Image: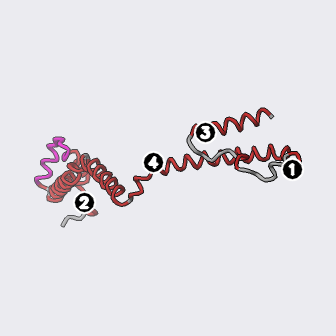
């Protein structure tokens, strides 16, 4: 067997040229040397074989495979999601719910501002004998439809500014 660490001295200068030779560069000097030198012809054969192998393995795969695989994987993931989590169906509703929750928290904030702002004026109970306790009408109505939410907010902010 030919050991790479023991390249014959006369072959060293051909070593680098073997690669070009493999790429198709004509090299008559190397041609001649290859006929006499078992080391270099073996090296050339090995390189050729290895090159073929590499090409066989990679060339058909490099372009179509990642795309194909990515497509298949995406499809599988999609199907899996659809099959495994019926919750996916509820995503739009969850989104809507989070929107409602946000609206509700905005309302709550507005309500707390409203209560803090109006509390001192309402404090003397004697002035409001018929309203000793908070009644439902003291609070903005809970979120019904978006229009009424907006009306409440608008009326709240108007009252804030009008003060
Ligand atoms: Zn040689």
Instruction: From the image, tell me which residue sits under label 1.
Output: 125
Q: Where is residue 43 in the image (x, y as percent from the top left)?
A: 19, 57
| Residue at the (75%, 44%) spot, across then down | 114
Q: Marks 4 and 2: CB-CB under 8 Å?
A: no
Element under disc 3: helix
Give the label on residue 7, or none. Answer: 2
Q: Which of marks 3 and 4 is in front?
A: 3
Say which label, 2 or 1, has the lower sequence index: 2
Element under disc 2: loop
Q: Which residue lies furthest to the left in this view?
A: 35
Give the magenta range.
Answer: 21-35
Is residue 18 visible to the viewer in this orientation of the structure? Answer: no
Q: Alpha carbon of mark 4 to alpha carbon of mark 1: how far?
A: 47 Å
Give left or right: position of 32 versus 155. left
Is residue 92 visible to the viewer in this orientation of the structure? Answer: yes
Give the label on residue 148, or none. Answer: 3
Name the residue nearer the viewer: 48 or 12. 48
Give the label on residue 142, or none. Answer: none
Q: Where is residue 74 in the image (x, y as percent from the top left)?
A: 32, 51
Instruction: Examine the image and state in which quarter residue 88 appears.
Output: bottom left
Name the residue nearer the viewer: 17 or 51. 51
Q: Alpha carbon of mark 3 to alpha carbon of mark 2: how far?
A: 90 Å
Say which label, 1 or 3, has the lower sequence index: 1
111 is higher (above) or lower (below) than 40: above
């Amino acid at each position: 067997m030919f050991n790479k660490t023991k390249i014959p001295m006369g072959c060293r200068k051909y070593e680098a040229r073997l690669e070009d030779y493999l790429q198709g560069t004509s090299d008559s000097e190397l041609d001649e040397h290859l006929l006499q030198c078992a080391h270099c012809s073996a090296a050339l054969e090995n390189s050729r074989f290895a090159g073929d192998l590499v090409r066989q393995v990679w060339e058909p795969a490099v372009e179509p495979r990642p795309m194909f695989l990515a497509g298949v994987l995406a499809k599988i993931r999609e199907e899996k999601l659809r099959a495994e989590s019926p919750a996916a169906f509820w995503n739009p509703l969850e989104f809507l719910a989070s929107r409602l929750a946000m609206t509700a928290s905005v309302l709550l904030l507005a309500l707390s501002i409203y209560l803090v702002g109006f509390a001192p004026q309402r404090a003397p109970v004697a002035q409001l004998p018929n309203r000793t306790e908070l009644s439902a009408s003291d609070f903005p109505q809970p979120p019904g439809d978006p229009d009424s939410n907006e009306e409440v907010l608008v009326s709240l902010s108007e009252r804030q500014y009008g003060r």
